Image: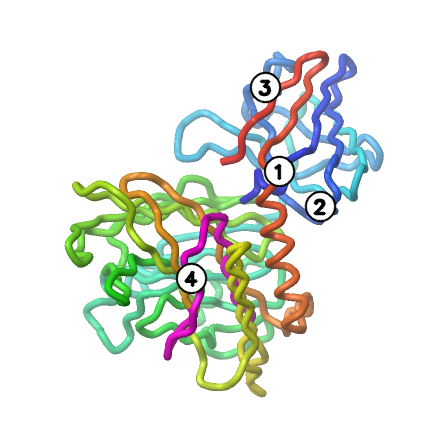
Amino acid sequence: MVVILLSCMSFNVSTSQTITIKNNTRIDYNDKVIELKFKEIKNHFSWLSEGNFKIINKNTKKELPYQLEYKGIKRPINVLIQLTLKQKEKLELTLLEENPSDFKVKTFARFVPERADDFAWENDKIAFRTYGKALELTPKQNAYGIDVWVKRTDKMIINERYKRGKYHEDHGDGLDYYHVGYTLGAGNCAPFLNDSIWYSKNYTKYEVLDNGPLRTTFKLYFDEWDVAKYKVRATKTITLDAGSQCNKIEVHYYSSSKGRIPIAVGIIKREEEGHVLFDKQKGVLGYWEPTYEKYGTTGVGVVIPLKMDEMKARKDQYLAVFKVPLNKVFTYYSGAAWDRAGEFTSNTQWFNYLKDFRSMSEIKSLEVTYSNNIKTLKNN
């Protein structure tokens, strides 16, 4: 997700130990997390090592929070920073050989064994959870989709809500009123054959690859299950950045079979009337749920940068259907927003956010300039 938002910015390193970032796009970047390759920076700052540097905004003289991204390995891959840059605007950063300050945590995830093996994650905008193997022992509570926990605070709330045990009640910072049931919930995916959704069982293993303060990434493993004539197992790697309403979801369906398989990404449909966006050409499915007097309104959406076969409404959920190759990773995005958080208060605002998010994903590369050397890096 994040590299898409960085695309078409240029980075210039000078002998005065500064990095200049320019937004060459026609899109304003508002609190977006972007990636700088750790190895490339170290090539120009030989003294650089893990955790021994500060990043300073040269204009404001203030320290800029950052995160080293490891992607589950022992050495850093990227330096993540969160920026606001308007079109054609430049920002100069200075690197200092000093220990960084403690940064505010804006993303977080954890395994929740005390609640039937939930896995929950959040950022400063919204929170989510999915369900583990232990919940299958209580079928009436089990669900297959992604759950949404709405919030109106930039603080991390997962631990507090689980500790309190009353997360279906609003104690001032939001709640879990989102019903998933036997659907894909808020943007989960599953194989779709013979006009049927072939749900996996709940995840059986997890790995946390990075965990804040600006990006959280984790990987979920799903045991083999029958999908019509196929036997399939899956992994789903989910990334959530600070400031974003949407998760990046990388899915890998493993099978001894070859070829392509139809997939459905879905959003649960409420009985009452809401607002729906079907944009098959762009791969954007948006839903502004009906408003409930007690709880407000939740917006849910998926962005799929792949060729769509169809988008349709079923009795219980909205589906976006497309084909993907077996034994290869594909990527899509899903997310949510709550009107009582104050940022999105209408279906128009929410749908525009999803369409803008999709437009950013069409930008294909990132130009990085170090002195006289230019490199173009492809997005993840």
Task: Give the vertical position of 28 relative to 369 (above or below).
Answer: below
Q: Which mark is in front, 3 or 4? A: 4
Image point (41%, 27%), residue name: 74
For mark 2, give the secondary structure: strand
Calculate the distance from the C-alpha at mark 4 to the C-alpha at mark 2: 31 Å
Q: How is the image coloured?
A: rainbow
Image point (38%, 72%), residue name: 180
Q: Nearer the viewer, residue 23 or 116?
A: 23
Residue linked to disc 1:
34
Residue 279 colored in magenta in the image:
no
Calculate the distance from the C-alpha at mark 1 to the C-alpha at mark 2: 10 Å
Task: Locate residue 190, reporting x and y percent.
Answer: 31, 58
The picture quadrant where one finds residue 295 is bottom right
Q: Which mark is in front, 1 or 4? A: 4
The residue range painted magenta reads: 298-318
Residue linked to disc 3:
40
> Which numbered marker is on residue 29?
2
The picture quadrant where one finds residue 271 is bottom left
Calculate the distance from the C-alpha at mark 3 to the C-alpha at mark 4: 42 Å
Amino acid of disc 2? Tyr
Decide: few, some or many residues near mark 1? Use Cα within 10 Å; few <14, some 14-19, many ≥20. Answer: many
Task: Give the vertical position of 99 relative to 115 (above or below).
Answer: above
Calculate the distance from the C-alpha at mark 2 to the C-alpha at mark 3: 23 Å
Q: Earlier in the sequence, mark 1 or mark 2?
A: 2
Calculate the distance from the C-alpha at mark 3 to the C-alpha at mark 1: 15 Å
